[in-house]
């Protein structure tokens, strides 16, 4: 069942936090993020989309290569 983060029980929330701290699943999470971004872009800006998933990934790569965005080192603590 799909629930918003604010609708999760404390136990479910703790499980999600634990999952989010596992860096071994970053590749899968990246693919999901690209897919979500592609879907949103297709919905809002269909004229810009050619190869949706590829264009999102390539755009992210270009932003990183050009230094437009900076990524902080991964933190293993909860704030």
Image (cartoon, helix red, strand yellow):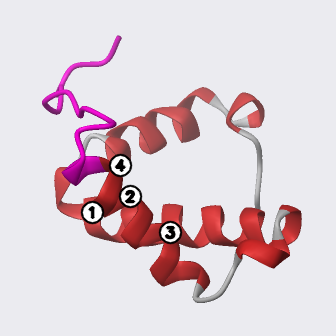
Packing grade of label 4 (10 A; few <14, some 14-19, many >=20) is: few
Tell me how far mark 4 sits from mark 1, CA to CA. 8 Å
Q: Residue at x 47, y 43 (%)?
A: 16
Q: Looking at the rendering, in which quadrant would you find the N terminus?
A: bottom right
Disc 3 is placed on an element classified as: helix
Q: Is residue 53 above or below residue 57?
A: below
Question: Disc 1 designates what residue?
Answer: 25
Mark positioned earlier in the residue sequence (4 or 1): 4
Mark positioned earlier in the residue sequence (4 or 2): 4
Q: Which residue is drawn at 24% across and 47% down?
A: 66
50 sits to left or right of 14 = right
Question: Disc 2 designates what residue?
Answer: 60
Q: What stretch is highlighted in magenta?
A: 64-79
Question: Disc 4 designates what residue?
Answer: 19
Mark 1 or 3, which is nearer the eye?
3
Q: Position of residue 42 (x, y in %)?
A: 78, 73
């Amino acid at each position: 069942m799909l629930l918003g983060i604010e609708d999760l029980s404390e136990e479910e929330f703790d499980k999600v936090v634990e999952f989010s701290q596992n860096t071994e699943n970053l590749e899968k999470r990246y693919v999901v993020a690209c897919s979500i971004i592609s879907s949103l872009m297709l919905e809002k800006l269909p004229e810009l989309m050619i190869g949706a998933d590829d264009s999102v990934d390539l755009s992210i790569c270009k932003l990183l290569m050009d230094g437009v965005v900076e990524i902080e080192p991964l933190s293993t603590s909860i704030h």
